[in-house]
Amino acid sequence: MADPGAVRLLVVDDEPDIVELLSASLRFAGYDVSTAANGKEALDLAKTFRPDRVQLDVMMPGMDGFSVLTRLRGEGHRVPVLFLTARDATEDKVRGLTTGADDYVTKPFSLSEVLARIGAILRRSNGGEVAPSSRLTFADIELDDDTHEVWKAGKPVSLSPTEFKLLRYFMSNPRRVLSKAQILDHVWNYDFAGEANVVEAYVSYLRRKVDTTEPRLLHTLRGVGYVLRVPSGS
C-alpha cells in the first residue's frame, strides 16, 4: 500500500515496456503511481485516481495525447502534465505547450531527466516547494482536507462536519488503536466523562457511510477503543 501522503502520478503510454520502466522507477522514488495504456483509461483514472501530475504520451491509438490534454483541461482538471514522446519537431512541442502541458520530454529519455522534470513541475505548481498532499488515503477510502470531500471506491460520500473530523482522525492514525477518551478529546475537544455513547454513535455513522464493503476497516477493540486497519490475510 502506498504512503497516504505520497504524490500521485499517472503514467499514460501505449508501450508496455515504457510503462513498466517508468512506473517501477517512480514507485521506487516514493511516488504513488497508476498507469493507463490509452486516452480513455487516462480520462477515467483522472476522475478516480485524481493524480497530482500526469505523464502523457503523445502518439497513442484512438485518442492522442493532445486530445487527452484538451479533454482534461476542458473538464476542469488543472493537474500538471508532462508530455513524453518520440515526436521532437518544434511545432509539436509548441502545440503541446499551448494545449496546456507544463513540460515536454522526447524519447529516448533518461530516468534521471524525467525525475528531475517531475520534481521541477511539482515545485512550480506548489509555489517553489512540494507541499504535503492534503489528501489522505486508506484502502479505498480517500479524504481531501482542503475541500472536505470524501470518496469510497471512487464515489463521493456526504459526511457531516463531525463525521468528517472523526474520519480524518482515524485516517491520520491508521493501524493505531484510539481510545474513546482520545477520540473525544481530539474530535469534540473535551475530556472523557461518561460520554462514550457519542463516540459509539458517530463510529456507527461512519461504518454505514464509508466502511460498507469487505474487508471491513474500522474495528472495535472492546474495552480499549477503535482502530482503522486492513484485517490480516485480506
Image (cartoon, rainbow, N blue to C red):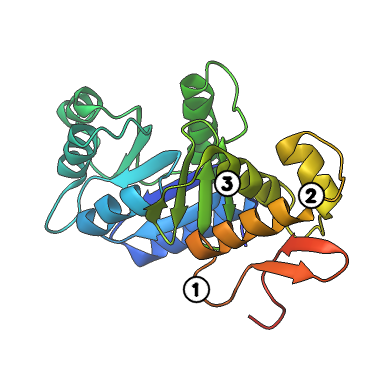
| Residue ranking furthest to the top | 127
Residue 126 to residue 178: above or below: above
Q: Amino acid at mark 1?
A: Thr
Give the label, 1 or 2, closer to the camera.
2
Q: CA distance from mark 2 to mark 3?
A: 16 Å
Q: Amino acid at mark 3?
A: Glu
Q: Residues within 10 Å of mark 2 (few under 14, many from 20)?
A: few
Please name the residue that numbered disc 2 is placed on.
195
Of callouts 1 and 2, the N-terminal one: 2
**Nearer-the-camera pick, 56 or 3:** 3
| Residue ranking furthest to the front | 194
Find numbered disc 2 in the image and state the secondary structure of the residue it sits on: loop
Image quarter in which the N terminus is found: bottom right
Q: Amino acid at mark 2?
A: Glu
Q: Badges 1 and 3: C-beta atoms under 8 Å apart?
A: no
Residue 227 to residue 133: above or below: below
Image quarter in which the C terminus is found: bottom right
Q: CA distance from mark 1 to mark 3?
A: 18 Å
Q: Residues within 10 Å of mark 3 (few under 14, many from 20)?
A: some
Q: CA distance from mark 1 to mark 2?
A: 29 Å
Q: Residue at x 69, y 45 (%)?
A: 169
Please provide percent x and percent y for residue 72. Answer: 24, 39
Please name the residue that numbered disc 3 is placed on.
163
